[in-house]
Image (cartoon, helix red, strand yellow):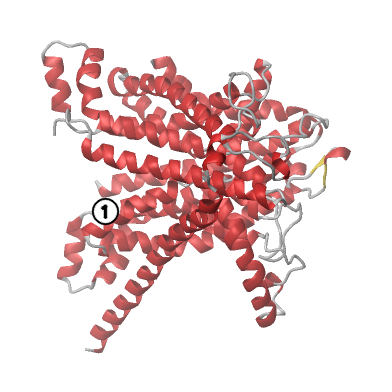
Amino acid sequence: MGALAALAAALVPLIAVALLLRARPLLDIVSIGQLLTSSAWRPLQKEFGFLPFIVGSLSVTMLAMLLAVPPCLLCAIYLAEYAPHRLREIVKPLIDLLAGIPSVVYGLWGVLMIVPFIRDILIPWSQQHFPHVTLLQTQNPTGYSILAGGIVLATMIFPVIISTAEEVIYAVPDGLREAAFSLGATRWQTVKGVVLRRALPGIIASIILGFSRAFGETMAVMMVVGNVPQIPRSIFDAGYPLAALIANNYGEMMSIPLYDAALLAAAFILLLIVLIFTIIARLFLLRAVKRTE
Amino acid sequence: MKRRQRKHIEERFFVGLMLISMVIVLGSLVLILATVLVKGLPALNWAMVTQVPQGGYYLGKEGGILNAIAGSLALAGGATVLSLVLSLGVVFYLQLFAKNARLVEGVRLALDVLWGVPSIVFGAFGFILMLWMGMRASLLGGIITLTLLELPVMVRTMDEVMQMAPAELKEAAYALGSTRLEMAQHVLLRQTLPGLLTAILLAFGRGIGDAASVLFTAGYTDRLPTSLLRPAASLPLAVFFQLGTPVPEVRQRAYAAALVLTLIVLLISLVSRLLTRHLTRHVVR
């Protein structure tokens, strides 16, 4: 049993080492710095620049964070501080349900609802009202865009952020709230000045967990983001996230030399970024637990 | 007086924003389920869930998605059984035998981090494992990869459940002279049974819904899964591949597959709620 536990604990480093070993043939001829900063993607010429894909992942993820964080925190505050007990008991399972929906179903929803919404409503509207803002202009009228990816991802990370943030806010000791009330503070003033301050490390952790979940998500994003290897200039441009790159090309990867090494290097980069963020989030959470004790 | 009014206006403003946020979050759940239902229900019929793809299937001819349903159940079922065996070992070790508290915390942290690893990375790792073992895309490859994906979910959930079992109960068993394994078998397992079943269902749900990890490892086929060494179809990939075609009849099958998948997930969520409420006959509170 001890061996099993050790094996389970060693899985993450094992995965990282395996990916790195398989990526070695590429890393032997090109430096990692070059891979990360080049935007030339021509597998047949052995040119593998990851920049467009990293920018693709980052832009989709940042859009998702911008869209998801404000409503998620407000929801978490409402559920923990305002909602009557019965409402909380009804809503929390629904949020768990949102977390359980498979990513292809999110992707299907994106294709059937979000992409047409962007194509038929948002793009014409922004072209009419903001013709000079480059961020809102595009040559890509399809709706398959980083914004579509961002919206779908935002919905996917709602449950991640809400459930973690709600838990840490709920765990703030009541004595603190009562002290603020006795000074004549309203509930919102108490939340703003006392509860959120106490729960801050946990809230930061919830946001980082949302980020790393969004960064690694593959299928749902891949179905709506357009998959064009370019650096997007506007939110309506197509992008190509790292995870989608791996998933889209698994079929050819064994037939072109170094291609498999490049894709597994991409997986390694993805893993590394997600690991860093997850570990930071866990450290914040540990601090949050200490604070509420 | 003025200050007082201002703080109440601020209160109302933010409560208003919170309510809007609640509507956004719950509304998106409703929109997703409604989309799947509206598109999926007309596409779902008896032939769809009882037939495998026939000739000319991808041009809109006869056939259904039974290959994907059976494949998904085999993949997620196999992975759940495997990870249950592994999980019980790990959890018993963490709960009963590990002496060093820091080591236990370390293993928990490592599993939490593993939980956060993206499924496409599991897929890539599974692919490397299969290359080493000289395997091709197959049911077994998919099961192994999904096991890795389900393991952290199952271990961490079971671990939490067992952590919550009252210490007096364990001590009472020890006081009667039982060994650690006897205690685990007769007291701990019984006490935590509903929670353990929920953990199993949760892991199964994660496994059956995941597409990125089986993409590399299980492949896709029009046949039913009959051998561990042959490729197996899966519902998420059925949605993904069939949505990409221009033929409307084939896209219908993507909707049907998505609906079946969603229904399975809903069923899992419902059953695990019922479990925590009803299967508590042997639980001491």
Q: Is residue B8 visible?
A: yes
> In the visual, does B117 lie left or right of A170?
right
User: Which residue occupies the foreground of this view, A238 or B105?
Assistant: A238
Residue A280, percent from left and from top: 47, 44
| Quadrant of res A28 | top right
User: Which residue occupies the foreground of this view, B169 or B76?
Assistant: B76
Residue A76, percent from left and from top: 35, 59
Q: Is residue A202 visible?
A: no
Quadrant including the N terminus of chain A: top left
Please, is residue A28 above or below residue A172 in the view?
above
Which residue sits furthest right? A45
> What type is the residue that disc 1 sits on?
Glu
> In the visual, does A97 lie left or right of B277?
right
Residue A12, percent from left and from top: 53, 30
SS state under label 1 = helix
Question: Badge 1: few (under 14), some or many (20 or more) residues near its Cα, within 10 Å?
Answer: few
| Residue located at (14% from left, 69% from top) | A182
Which residue sits furthest bottom? B2
Residue A73, percent from left and from top: 39, 61
> In the visual, does A183 lie left or right of B148?
left
User: Which residue occupies the foreground of this view, A228 or B264?
Assistant: B264
**Residue, disc 1:** A89
